[in-house]
Amino acid sequence: MTETDKRLLAEAKRVREFAYCPYSKFAVGAAVLGSSGTIYGGCNVENASYSVTNCAERTAIFHAISAGENDILAIAVVAEGVKPVPPCGACRQVIAEFRIPHILLANLADQVREMTLSELLPDAFSDEDLEL
Ligand code: THU
């Protein structure tokens, strides 16, 4: 585990505290590393209309893109669980959109699982499939 990986995990854990999750009570934090070297955090933000909920991963990615990053090098995700949290299908698709190559999943017991993009979402639908 590199120092940058540790910083990413620490930031994901820190912003998890800001999760707005009154319905599920399941707090998630994520952090992404932009190619500028800046780290951007995000937490899950729920809604009374449940399906409008935004997961921590997408919040962090949208935070980085909105700050002008166009290349995301890594993402870390932290939640409480018996094993590192697996991202949902929608977040896997967004992680694939930005081709994030380095994925770290962790729980509060500091168990960490590293995944590649193709492990996370094999055979992803992408821009290439739009070229008719
Ligand atoms: N959630 C995330 O933020 N990321 C994940 O990887 C899994 C699920 C959120 C969505 C919802 O607010 C809560 O966790 C329970 O599903």
Image (cartoon, rainbow, N blue to C red):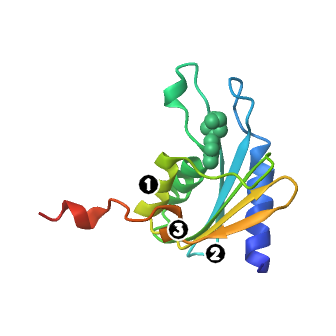
Q: As drawn, which residue projects farthest toward the right?
A: 109
Label 2 SS:
loop
At mark 3, the secondary structure is: helix
Mark 2–mark 1 CB contact (< 8 Å): no
Residue 119 is marked as 3
Q: Which mark is residue 53?
A: none
For the residues labelled 1 and 3, the Cα–Cα distance comes to 12 Å
Hey, which quadrant is residue 53 in on the image? Answer: top right
When the figure is inspected, residue 78 is found, relative to residue 45, above or below; the finding is below
Q: Position of residue 107 (x, y in %)?
A: 79, 54
Vertical side of 30 occupied by 75: above or below: below
Of callouts 1 and 3, which one flags the residue occurring earlier in the amino acid sequence? Answer: 1
Between the C-alphas of marks 2 and 3, the distance is 25 Å
Mark 3: few, some, or many residues within 10 Å (few <14, many ≥20)? few
The residue where tag 1 is placed is: 93
Residue at the (44%, 62%) spot, across then down: 96
Q: Is residue 44 visible?
A: no
Q: Residue at x 43, y 65 (%)?
A: 122
Label 2 or label 3, whichever lies nearer to me, is 3
Residue at the spot 80% in from the left edge and 42% down from the top edge: 17
Q: CA distance from mark 2 to mark 1?
A: 24 Å
- The label shown at residue 37 is 2
Task: State the SS at label 1.
Answer: helix
Mark 1 surroundings within 10 Å by alpha-carbon count, few (fewer than 14), some (14 through 19), many (20 or more): some
Numbered disc in front, either 2 or 1: 1
Tell me the kind of residue under disc 3: Glu
> x%, y% of residue 34?
57, 70
User: Camera-side residue: 48 or 121?
Assistant: 121
Q: Amino acid at mark 1?
A: Gln
The quadrant of the picture occupied by the C terminus is: bottom left
Left of 25 or right of it: where is 125? left
Please state which amino acid type lies under the numbered disc 2: Gly
